[in-house]
Amino acid sequence: MNRFSYTRADDIASALNAHNAPAAAFLAGGTNLVDLIKEGVARPDRLVDIRRLPMKAIEAADNGGMRIGALATNSAVAYDERIQSRYPLLSKALLAGASAQIRNVATVGGNMLQRTRCHYFYDTATPCNKREPGAGCGAMNGVNRIHAILGASEHCIAVHPSDMCVALAALDASVLVTSDSGDRTIAFDEFHRLPGDTPQKDTNLRDDEMILAVDLPAEGFADHHAYVKVRDRASYAFALVAVALGLKLDGDRIDDVRCALGGVAHKPWRNRDAEAALRGKTLTRAAVRDFASAMVSDARGRPCNAFKIELTTRAIVRAFEHASGNKLAASEDDPT
Ligand code: SF4
């Protein structure tokens, strides 16, 4: 572990000012950052503790949606009665992640900025382009069972580990950030990046920016939603595949659909063309299977993870079953 200084910020301006150093890092819950420091993966020379900043509120927003402060804990959001009633998809995704102890301290902003759990990224004895650009990728021809099937590059096949972010992507949330040059809003879909030839960059957040809040739109898909997480054990495990689904149904007609995938790409994965093609169709197992196939049409499996492609399509069908109250199983083209 390298030596670092520690500063506790009392307001946003002083936090931004203290963070203005080449290797400074914001410290909130610390549930990922402290591990990264202990493993020698993160080497900040200055930690800026932002836990005292007034960014914990969960409140109604003018657009009819809700604003969640970046320092609200995962537990506070998951158990907030307004979130549970209006955005149950988000609450369920949060409760599918980590453990109760971690959720009690991990923050919304930190959840968004957590880094991949690729084993090679954490093992400093192996090459990793994300940890050390240009070093190579140990996972490419290694044990890549947990790695990406969509959106990967020749430089990195890591996946984004968050559950919360998969739900936020499906909900079309947005991210409010600030810097010395003012505030700006980033669409959630644009917040995380694909690896391309810069896998060291997980997000489009600039070095001088800090996350203030996440904004939820008014539509929360409370009536028809599902979060399906497939993992190796029932709790405290990252997703092999996750599906966040929101539906608007008019009888058996699909008026709207939002679907985001986790565990399969470097960011929560949306396919808006596939969603558009499903809108207006009758909810049948055949239509959902076609949609699931379209969601993974660009997938590429590797020796250890090709199983994820079929697993993803089945998880998507399962999500539609949950979200529709099992209408799928009763549809005409599938009498079982
Ligand atoms: Fe590093 Fe990405 Fe390769 Fe993992 S997949 S070893 S994070 S470059």
Image (cartoon, rainbow, N blue to C red):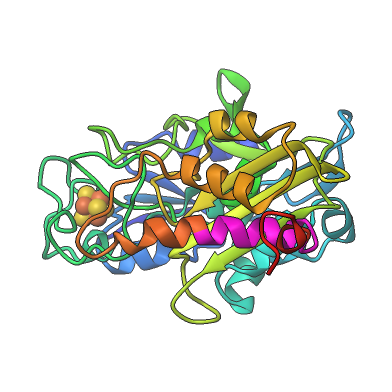
- Residue 300 coordinates in the image, percent (x, y): 29, 47
Q: In this picture, which residue range is highlighted in magenta?
A: 314-326
- Of 207 and 149, nearer the camera is 149
Asked if residue 90 lies left or right of residue 35, the reply is right
**Above or below: residue 75 compared with residue 198:** below
Q: Is residue 313 left or right of residue 257?
A: left
Q: Is residue 325 magenta?
A: yes
Could you tell me which residue is drawn at 55 percent across and 34 percent down? 274
Q: Quadrant of the C terminus?
A: bottom right
Question: Which residue is farthest top?
Answer: 181
Residue 281, image x, y percentages: 72, 36
User: Residue 282 sits in which quadrant?
Assistant: top right
Q: Observer-nearest residue: 70 or 262?
A: 262
Q: Nearer the viewer, residue 312 or 243?
A: 312
Magenta stretch secondary structure, dominant: helix
User: Which residue occupies 86% across, 35% down?
Assistant: 61
Q: Is residue 73 visible?
A: no
Q: Quadrant of residue 39?
A: bottom left
Tell me the quarter of the picture where residue 63 sits.
top right
| Magenta-colored stretch includes residue 315 | yes
Q: Quadrant of the N terminus?
A: bottom left
From the viewer's perspective, is 112 left or right of 130?
A: right
The residue at 29%/42% (across/down) is 152
Residue 132: tell me if it is visible. yes
Q: Which residue is at the front of the view, 29 or 155?
A: 155
Q: Position of residue 174 (x, y in %)?
A: 66, 33
